[in-house]
Image (tube, grey):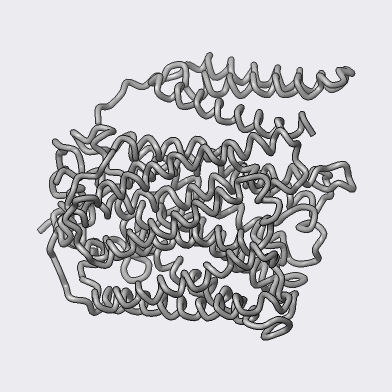
Amino acid sequence: MSESTKSNHTSFLEYKGKYRGILGWILSTDHKRIGLLYLYTMLVFFSVAAILGLLMKIQLIAPGHTIMGPATYNAMFTMHGIIMIFIIVVPGLPAVFGNFFLPLMIGAKDVAFPKLNLASWWIYVIGILIVLTSQFLGDGPPDTGWTFYAPYSFQTPANIVPALVGAFVLGFSSILTGINFVVTIHRLRTPGMTWFKMPLFPWTLYATAWIQILATPVIGITLLLTVMERTLGVGIFDPALGGDPILYQHLFWIYSHPAVYIMILPGLGVISEIIPVFSRKRIFGYKAIVLSSLAIAFVGYFVWGHHMFTSGMSGRALFAFSFLTFLVAIPSAVKVFNWVATMYKGSLIFQTPFFWAVSFIFVFMIGGFSGLTLGSLATNVHLHDTHFVVAHFHFIVFGGTGFSFLAAIHYWFPKMFGRMFDASWANIGWVVFFAGFLTLYLPMFSLGIMGMPRRYYDYLPEFHAANILSSLGAMLMIAGAMIIIVNLVRSARYGKKTNEKNPWGGKTLEWQADTPPTLENWEEIPEVTEKPYEY
Amino acid sequence: MSQEKSHISSYQSHVFVLLALLALTAISVAVTTLELGRLDTLVAMLIAATKAAIVLVWFMHLKFDNKLYAIFTVLVLVVFLLVLYVTFFDYSYR
């Protein structure tokens, strides 16, 4: 058998190319292996950041010094934020599932630029290493929070520059992935797959890729300007030198709010894949979901000012940003209505991916509504920089991206690894995690309304009861996460083998490929004749 | 996907781009010697934008490629201008 024929029939997990062992993975240009490289890297750093989060919650279980002092607490929430945002949730779904499934879902053999794709992962790893050096070099770990706000970020003696440079480098990885996905979707769709026959996950990856390309350079420039401000004193953000610290906030949030949509949009795509499959029903309002994804990506560019309502912006700008924030809620709500309408009178199949999908809708709705509370000018003044913001943020970013990530990994697990996960443990993990999540974050809403500020290692005695509940919730959620991770890792290694191409009865192209897929995905490029989700 | 015909630029075209960029760089340096007051930034930005346009249109082939690329470029510029406008909505009324 010739080498190329062999590669057509061997699973990508077993294929032996030019390099063997670990080199066969870290030098592979196969989109599926690169997706898994991102997954494994993220798993390691998610565990680190989750432990930091748990330690913070243990500190907050009682007022005063419990297990750490204020300086350590500041460093902990900074590192927790930097890892979770820049290393986990921003690359998150596109890097793992976008890389793995975009070519499969559009009938391509790989992404448009496979070598660039591998370079993106390497740049990502280099960025992580640079960020990590900030912990061990210089005058102590960063203590600014993941937002690096001016003027503190160039006044603190802590080791800020490597963290800024690391985040800058990570941005390049994001931009290159975005470029790769835009070109892949434009150029490599299989014959017959017109734009409106493309599944919804690739559509959300497309909208996300444009944000990655257009918004990420802004944060890159901003971080570099902060490095220059810190090292050269150029006077752009420093008021003592004639600079404007609010300009930093503008530039930071011009990226970082669209970045929330980088995190969320692919999650919305995942849920749009799962709901019709487990409802055995065509998705309700396919075009409305597509257009709402593009609308979220577009309007999402112009709402950044709602992070700055108390910063001293002009009154007219406050009004404009509040109005635009309410506007972006509309396309988000369109999706929720469509998912519910899809489930209505469907033949619901209660399996783990579906549980994650419906619980996603629940937490995403709470996150969305609390976002409107913060988007209102009057309530924002009271709630700004309180635990209410922490709760809202985690309901959207962890509830949104995290739940959809877990929905995605359970949905696509058999295709990725050629094995089934243990459904009983997966469901137990979901129940424990979901209960822990709500117990951890719901009390934060009331703590915020009562006036407990965020980012303090200590608090007044009246906040004690809700903090105990929240800390116990954190422990429960970590227990749930451990059950899920152990079950998935164990199942990937020892789970029941399956070669079944389509275990869930999906209608999109990836379910026509071999399980696990071969090196170039298809023996023959598939042709698409009908829309996706035709049940 | 069908293969599109690609335009091959002539050496003259590349030389034109190079000379135009050098001339505009010289002009932007020369302009700094004039006292234009509030117009300083505007003139510098206009020269820079002209340079960027020359690079995009001729050197990067927007003029000759599929019009889709030009449409996307314009859309990106519109987003960029809107972001600038919204930012200065704060500064103008502060």
Q: Position of residue A300 (x, y in %)?
A: 52, 40
Q: Residue A349 is drawn in which quadrant?
A: bottom left
Q: Position of residue A133 (x, y in %)?
A: 64, 68
Q: Position of residue B7 (x, y in %)?
A: 39, 19
Image point (35%, 79%), residue name: A486
Q: Residue A511 is drawn in which quadrant?
A: bottom left
Would residue B24 be found to the left or right of residue A348 on screen? right
Q: Is A431 placed above or below A212 here?
A: below
Q: How many marks?
A: 0
Q: Is A484 placed above or below A182 here?
A: below
| Residue toward you, A291 or B48 | A291
Does residue A16 appear anywhere in the picture? no
| Residue toward you, A249 or A134 | A249
**What residue occupies the far left of the structure in this picture?**
A1
| Residue toward you, A477 or A327 | A327
Image point (75%, 40%), residue name: A313
Q: Is A445 placed above or below A107 here?
A: below
